[in-house]
Image (cartoon, rainbow, N blue to C red):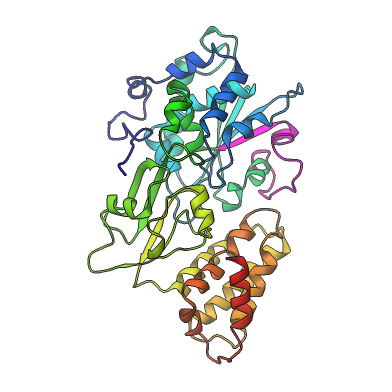
Amino acid sequence: MSLTPILTAHWDEADSHTLAGYSRHHGYDALKKALDTDPDAIIQLVKDSGLRGRGGAGFPTGMKWGFVPQDGKPHYLVVNADESEPGACKDIPLLFANPHALIEGIAITCYAIRAKHAFVYIRGEVPHAHRRLRAAVAEAYAAGHLGKNVHGKGVDIDIVVHCGAGAYICGEETALLESLEGHRGQPRLKPPFPAVAGLYAAPTVINNVETIANIPVLFRNGPEWFRQFGTEKSPGFKLFAISGHVKRPGIYEAPLGITMRELLGHAGGMRDGHKLKFWLPGGSSVPMLTEEHLDLPMTYEDMAAAGTMLGTGTPMLFDETTSVVKAVARWLHFYKHESCGKCTPCREGTFWITAVLKRLEKGQGHADDLTLLAELCKQMSGRTFCALGDAASTPFPAAFKRFPEEFEAGMHTPADDAFAPVAAFVGASA
């Protein structure tokens, strides 16, 4: 399957990030057309396209917009640009190379959901993208694409670019809202959901950068055009940020439904003299797969059927030189460090899982360590305020299922029956 450069079509142009560069390729034509369209018709168009959120969950975008009640309260749009999943790197390059696609998408979305204010929450560690986005917003204001009475249509749209402090937990939508309001970034208990009571207790739509950047090209070309890419349940195209032990790591835009084997071919294959050992479809928070899964379509439903998730669509590939135990230990160290500490299962679970994995990595594991790991993951999964606890409980079961011998090798005092409870848990969660 060939690549489909659409969002990335003009990234190689020196001025792709400027208003002039964006305007050469139908820039802001979709906004002008949208302002003459009924807002509900725009929401229906997005529903008809089948566009799913590109931030990891894959929730239908049009359906999310449709949840916003018409209750007379102010409405807000929040764009989650707090990209911080280990292995994920697609939104920041998009902001750097083509920020006006996001800005035009924001303006159309605000009009559709009857919002006058939008916020872009961006990571503090990427000042280059932050500066470039601010410059693009200033250009859009100067050209009349934002501000009061946009293009004389009586519509007001303002964008605030908010720089976060680098907390991974603020990638969770309600923790992001807390941070935007000036509070400590910790997730809220749901319900109520943000569509009903989000930012400042008002109806709020929260979308990923890539999701909103799709809106102008989708609105300009229509849902039928969009659905010619991808599959019935996962339509459209996707930015796949491929990293790891490949010859040409980078961002490849392709239709959903392309296989990992095809993407690996575009990335030049594994580095010379080495072979694939395991890979993750969408960052460190999704269960790992092996070479036998390379021919599965990269869609939300096919990845779920294989016991994993498409996630952010940022595959990481590892060759035979990688220790599975060491890799899982490093990911859990990250989750332990980034846990906000609000939930006891997450706060304590990430601490203990990391400690046990460190023992196994050093070959100092106890006889019941694998049973303990399985129990810790079981107690964390589905028992926390947000998905960080679920993400932290995911790597070990999948890794043990694929490579049990590497964990067994870390046992200093093995016992014959040490693995029976682990096998039972892994089988139940597969």
Q: In the visual, does 345 lie left or right of 336? A: right
Q: Which x, y percent locates residue 254?
A: 37, 42
The percent position of residue 303, horizontal first and vertical second, equals 49, 54
Placement of 119 over or under 167, stated as above or below:
above
Q: Is residue 290 above or below residue 74?
A: below
Image: magenta residue range:
179-207
Q: Tell me which residue sits at (36%, 30%) in the image.
A: 17
334 and 360: which is toward the camera:
360
Membership of 199 in magenta stretch: yes
- Residue 132 versus residue 299: which sits nearer the camera? 299
Task: Name the side, left or right, on which 109 lies relative to 187.
Answer: left
Q: Is residue 100 visible?
A: no
Residue 244: tell me if it is visible.
Answer: yes
Q: Quadrant of the C terminus?
A: bottom right
Quadrant location, the N terminus: top left
Q: Is 116 contained in the magenta span?
A: no
Kindly indicate the quadrant of the structure image that contains residue 65: top right
Q: Residue at x 62, y 74 (%)?
A: 374
